[in-house]
Amino acid sequence: MMSPLQVIFILVSAITLGAALMVVTTRNMVRAALWLVLALFGVAILFVLLEAGFFAVAQVIIYIGAIAILMIFAIMLTRRIAQDPGPQINSTWPLAAVIALAIFGLIVLFIQGWDKTMSTPPALPDGFAPLSDLGVALVSANQYLIPFEVASILLLAALIGAIIIAWDRK
Amino acid sequence: MIPLSWYLIFAAALFSIGLFGVLSRKNAVAILMGVELMLNAVNVNLIAFWRYLSFETMAGQVFAVIVFAVAASEVAVGLALVISVYRRRQSIVADDINLLKY
């Protein structure tokens, strides 16, 4: 007998994987972007199931609020292509499917042979606040200060680079 | 409760679907969508490992934050490239962007 959480997990993951399949197969790019939003929502629900509420919120704000909307803008700015009547998929797609299935099979094989796939997560202690721990970990010099700063500089450099690349010099 | 292996298999499936999209799509924006799916699969794995194996240390969550930053940078630069290429060549089909091939 499955517990309610397991039923929720199976439903959400089935919807997410179905939406992801639509993202990579739909011909209309605007619809693909909307399916992407659904898939990202499914992942946000999985973050809630994993008791990482901050990441569910960040997923909705950053991925759906910024990245997916940016993609819809890019699709609309390149509109003639979005309505391209020809095939939207390479002629070598069977090879791509074989590679993707092979990698999926390999990963599942490794997971099956691994003895640490426990069935229940350890209980969180009372008063455990992952969000404040995460905040402290990101700015402590003996924890993850350097990776955090490197990520910040990467983001800054990428945004400046994006402005320069997309600049219309004419 | 939900076994850890369910999350891992879900993430593997999401990663493979994203990989299929990256390898098979013609439109450059669709290739970026495939990359987004793959990065999301990685994030599910990181958070699942954090929750099940080491919730006292914050390493998994910190790396998930960094993956978020990398995903945002990647999509910003990628879409800027798409718009720049479209302006010059009137096409964002990956097969047509072959100037560096010769």
Image (tube, rainbow, N blue to C red):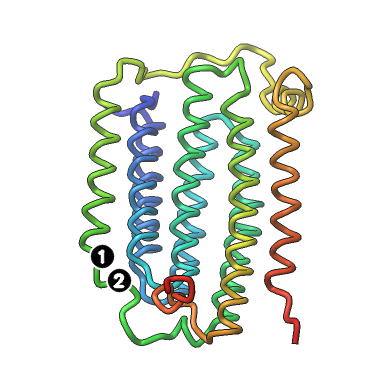
Identify the residue position indicated by label 2 in the image: A90
Identify residue type, mark 1.
Trp
Left/right of residue B92 with respect to residue A113 in the rendered view? right
Q: Mark 1 — on which chain does it sit?
A: A
Residue at (36% x, 16% y) in the render: A116
Label 1's element? Answer: helix
Left/right of residue A117 with respect to residue B89 in the rendered view? left
- The quadrant of the rendering that contains the C terminus of chain B is bottom left
Q: Residue A144: x percent and y percent? A: 70, 26
Label 2's element? Answer: loop
Q: Residue B14: x percent and y percent? A: 38, 47
**How many numbered markers are drawn?**
2
**Residue A61 in the image: above or below residue A137:** below
Left/right of residue A83 with respect to residue A68 in the rendered view? left
- Graded by Cα atoms within 10 Å as few (under 14), some (14 to 19) or many (20 or more), the crowding at tag 2 reads some
Residue at (60% x, 69% y) in the render: B81
Q: Residue A147: x percent and y percent? A: 68, 32
Residue at (46% x, 81% y) in the render: A82
Identify the residue position indicated by label 1 in the image: A93
Q: Are marks 1 and 2 in contact (CB under 8 Å)?
A: yes
Identify residue type, mark 2.
Asn
Residue at (69% x, 41% y) in the render: A151
Mark 1 vs mark 2: tell me if same chain.
yes
- The quadrant of the rendering that contains the N terminus of chain B is top left
When asked about the image quadrant of residue B98, the answer is bottom left
Q: Residue lying furthest front in this view?
A: B102
**Residue A68 in the image: above or below residue B85:** above
Q: Which label is found at residue A120?
A: none
**How far is mark 1 from mark 2, CA to CA?**
5 Å
Q: Residue lying furthest top in this view?
A: A125
User: Could you say which is closer to the camera, residue B39 or residue B98?
Assistant: B98
